[in-house]
Image (cartoon, rainbow, N blue to C red):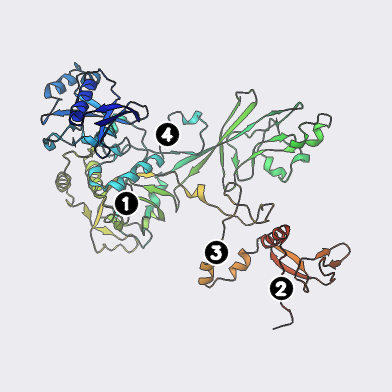
Amino acid sequence: MTDVFLNDRFIGTVEKEKASSFIEAVKEKRRAQELPLELSIRYDKHLDSIFIATDPGRVLRPLIVVKNKEPLLKQQHIEALKRNELTWNDLINLGIIEYVDASEEDNLLVAKSIEEINEETTHLEIDPIAMFGLLLSLVPFANHNQSSRLGKVGRANKQALGLYAANFLSRMDTDVSILHYPQKPIVRNFAYDVINPYPNGQNVVVAVMCYEGYNMSDAIVVNKGSVDRGFARSTYFRPYTANELHYTGNLKDEICVPTKDVFGYRTEKAYRNLEEDGIVYPEAELKAGDVVIGKISPPKFMLEMEEISFARTKKENSTTIRQNEEGIVDSVFITVDSEGHKLVQVRMRDNRIPEIGDKFASPHGQKGVIGLIVPEEDMPFTARGIKPDIIFNPHGIPSRLTVGYLIELIAGKTGCLKAKYIDGTAFQKNKVEEFEKALKELGFREDGKETLYDGITGKPLQVKIFIGNMYYLKLKYMVGNKIQTRASGKVTLLTRQPIEGRAKGGALRLGEMEKDALVGHGASLLLKERFSSDNTIVYVCPNCGCFGIHDKIRKKDYCPLCNSHKLEPIEISYASKLLLEELMSLHLLPRLKLKNKYEE
């Protein structure tokens, strides 16, 4: 007998000889609407069990049913669909199309096209592009790319800048950017017109060549003239919020301009942009540390004590611009939250011009940062005076097997010269030969290569350069959001070492491996500076090696262990001192052995 499970619960058995006919009977009932459309059935030969699933959360995809080497979707059905006499639901009700989940696919053989149908075929794809997801279906000539590279395309598309929402000016979203001049791609799939997404890239001229070693690995070289004309410019938005909270004891926060007695560690200059209500005015230019929303709060330990005057216990609690950030106040929203507290939201904007280190990607998963922005007069140019916007390294093609990248370049070139959109839908009959023929008719080399001239010397380059048009994406990872610098600042209370975290104004840690690298490069004296962030002086008894007591007021030294009055001041890191003191708290007595300073 073969076990049968429904949603992973045992419900009965079927005779082994009748297992396949049982599965077919269930499928026929599903196609006849006698069972739910979402039901899936699968036979596992290793476990000799049949699994039926109806639970929610499974991803289903539609397929055309094939019987006796013939798809059930006939030409007359297609004609009826065109005349609007049939609908999608009609095809499902007729059992021509059915929904299949991932587990049921294990028992199926799906043909990509009618020509591939054989005796074992059970289903046919509605269109070969349907095997891709939503984002992958937008990639032109995706069938010419390596599958693992296509996996990276989806992530790049999610990270690309464009118009993420039409009403972005009235939203307070965190950490978003808007591309100033988004364009629709010249080379695109039919899925692009069906989905009609907001554009998230720009059409650029790409030359495949090396440039002075600045586009090594995955880096790209960008034309400064293109940047000046608006290429990849974007605006970064960040909201700042503050609430007037109410506490017990009739105490509450107050959004206002703090008075001088509660400035805390901030200077009067930090509050210069606040208006009378304690909120910054629109279009104010702010830098790191400037106050956006002024606010004072009662101290936490005073919340239960009504009798003490609130006026003497105000605490500064303003919202300020984050470290390493700056911008212009875009808009101010004043409202109340769900609990009736006053809520102030200020949205900042920062104009972002492409700079070295900003991340870009092609639609084929070729990601890279800007390695150099070249003055326009130094860029290589063609005989017709065309200068590329981006120079891409040819070494990024062979190992990645993204042939679709090269095809899109030549197809984009054809589309720009013919002033029409090119259909780059995967698995279609678009042949490279057609683009080559079109280029030849337009007076260009059919292989897409051209003679380029050095922008510095004016001499022609020794080799022909492959140059064409492509849709490029600017990703959200920009140097302006990642850069982290610090000289001096806050330290942690316990170890007295600099705090960690960019948002807190922390430092970058120099660890053991970085130390070894500096020593290996002959820069060991730099470690004297880098490893002295928590220097402290301790007084050690030279006789017993224990920590002594140094009385600064009476100017007396005393060792509690051996009663010696002679201690030696030693400079060590505060973290080392902390470790030794924690060992003492465990009743372990560490001793420091001092060298005789008179010994050589």
Q: Residue furthest right?
A: 554
Disc number placed over residue 512 in the picture, else none: 3
Please name the residue shown 76% across and 37% down the image: 301
Mark nearer the viewer, 1 or 3: 3
* Tag 2 near tag 1, CB within 8 Å: no
Task: Say which residue label 2 marks.
Answer: 593
Task: Say which residue label 1 marks.
Answer: 388
Mark nearer the viewer, 2 or 4: 2
Q: Secondary structure at mark 3?
A: helix
- Residue 176: x %, y % from top left: 48, 38
Please name the residue shown 54% across and 71% down the image: 519
* Tag 3 near tag 2, CB within 8 Å: no
Residue placed most toward the observer, 68 or 298: 68
Q: CA gap, disc 4 to disc 1?
A: 28 Å
Q: Earlier in the sequence, mark 1 or mark 3?
A: 1
Please name the residue shown 41% across and 41% down the image: 159
Sort mark 2 into few (<14), some (14-19) or many (20+) by Cα contacts within 10 Å. few
- Residue 213: x %, y % from top left: 36, 62
- Residue 369: x %, y % from top left: 41, 52
Task: Say which residue label 4 marks.
Answer: 164
User: Image height check: is 430 above or below 510?
Assistant: above
Residue placed most toward the observer, 294 or 316: 316
Mark nearer the viewer, 3 or 4: 3
Quadrant position of residue 339: top right
Is residue 9 shown left or right of residue 515? left
Kindly identify the amino acid type of the residue bearing the numbered disc 1.
Pro
Q: Secondary structure at mark 4?
A: loop
Image quadrant containing the C terminus:
bottom right
Quadrant position of residue 287: top right
Q: Earlier in the sequence, mark 2 or mark 4?
A: 4
